[in-house]
Amino acid sequence: MISIRNLSKEWGDFGLRDINLEIKGNEYFIIIGPTGVGKTLLLECVAGLHYPDRGRVFIGNRDVTDLPPEKRNIGFVYQDYLLFPNMNIRDNIKFGLRFKNFSKNEIDEKIKKVSELLQISHLLDRNPKTLSGGEQQRVALARALVIEPRALLLDEPLSALDPGIRRILQEELREIHKKIKTTTIHVTHNFDEAISLADRIAVMSNGEILQVGKPEEIFRKPISEFVADFTGIENIFNGISEIDGGIAKIKINNVQIYAITPKTGNVRFSIRPEEITLSKMMFGSSARNTFRGKILGIADKGQLVRIVVDIGIPLAVLITRGSYEGMRLSPNANVYASFKASGVHVF
């Protein structure tokens, strides 16, 4: 539905470089990356607020690269809302229809419909200054959606909100998308937000797209150390891989770890903390990798407990509070750590 082809854009001493993305119709697509990697600049090129130096942008089968924003039929929401302080909420929402030829009755009906969808009907006569951050963001979404855009672009829409309101609006965004199915590109630096909302995710760094995939793919199979680190994988190691009997054996210090990979020689690999099982006694398991180790540290994370185990390399493990309390674990205790060969990701 949205096709970005070989897009490059110089911006001072920074630039977007050969961006290629295909966003499907009705998809909720999230672009994630740290601050300053070009996410907003890319979104603004799609919106027509900047024209690329090279490359093309298509919406549907239409090449919109050289069209102004108002000709692209796109709704855009910034993180700081950009509501007009001299207009009430009704007129703020109506402003999105200024390039459309609708009658007064049609405009009133559209405002009514989108206000009910965003649950802001009771705010229409209010001034933006009197609204909370969450209410202002709902108004900004209403203004973007009232034009019935072919695509909705969201630039860090939840980042300015406190955690409680952010969670509520995150749920609402998911429900709104289910109802209206507008193709959406949402940029954020928050991985939890991306996991919760995205059909697919693109990870961005320094003006380039590093990896595109479903949340599970990005989360469990990062293709680079940057992606692994950004998505919160703690266990990242260097090792030497050799293939024996169709399976890789990776040596690191005096530890040998089994993995499923064709790669040999010097490799980097990761193991997600939540894919490691702990027990106080040796037990039968299908996991190829089982090691006896000593607990170095324990950190309470609420419903989860983070435990670092020395198996010859320090291994961070996440287990549930119930498992932790049931095993009565303590620092310096001996435990067994197990994980499958398929849980070792080599890049």
Image: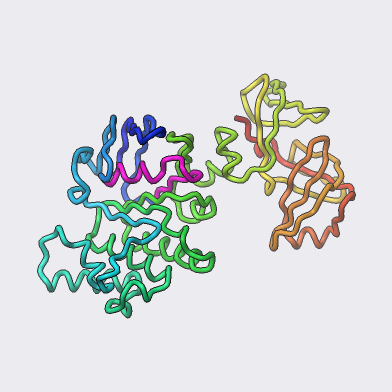
- 144 to the left or right of 137: left
Q: Nearer the viewer, residue 192 or 139?
A: 139
Q: Quadrant of the N terminus?
A: top left
The percent position of residue 26, horizontal first and vertical second, equals 33, 51
Residue 141, quarter of the rendered image? bottom left
Q: Nearer the viewer, residue 18 or 257?
A: 18
The percent position of residue 214, horizontal first and vertical second, equals 48, 44
- 162 to the left or right of 107: right
Q: Nearer the viewer, residue 160 or 344?
A: 160
The percent position of residue 326, horizontal first and vertical second, equals 82, 61
Residue occupying image coordinates x 22% and y 60%: 147
The total of numbered circles placed on residues is 0
Seen in the picture, residue 294 relative to 141 is either above or below; the reply is above
Seen in the picture, residue 284 relative to 156 is either above or below; the reply is above
Seen in the picture, residue 136 relative to 158 is either above or below; the reply is below
Residue occupying image coordinates x 28% and y 35%: 52
Residue 259, quarter of the rendered image? top right
Q: Quadrant of the C terminus?
A: top right
The percent position of residue 68, horizontal first and vertical second, equals 19, 45
Color encoding of the figure: rainbow
Seen in the picture, residue 181 relative to 2 is either above or below; the reply is below
Q: Which residues are magenta?
A: 29-47
- 72 to the left or right of 214: left
Residue occupying image coordinates x 77% and y 59%: 323
- Is residue 45 rendered magenta in the image? yes
- Is residue 96 rendered magenta in the image? no
- 209 to the left or right of 319: left
Residue occupying image coordinates x 27% and y 45%: 49
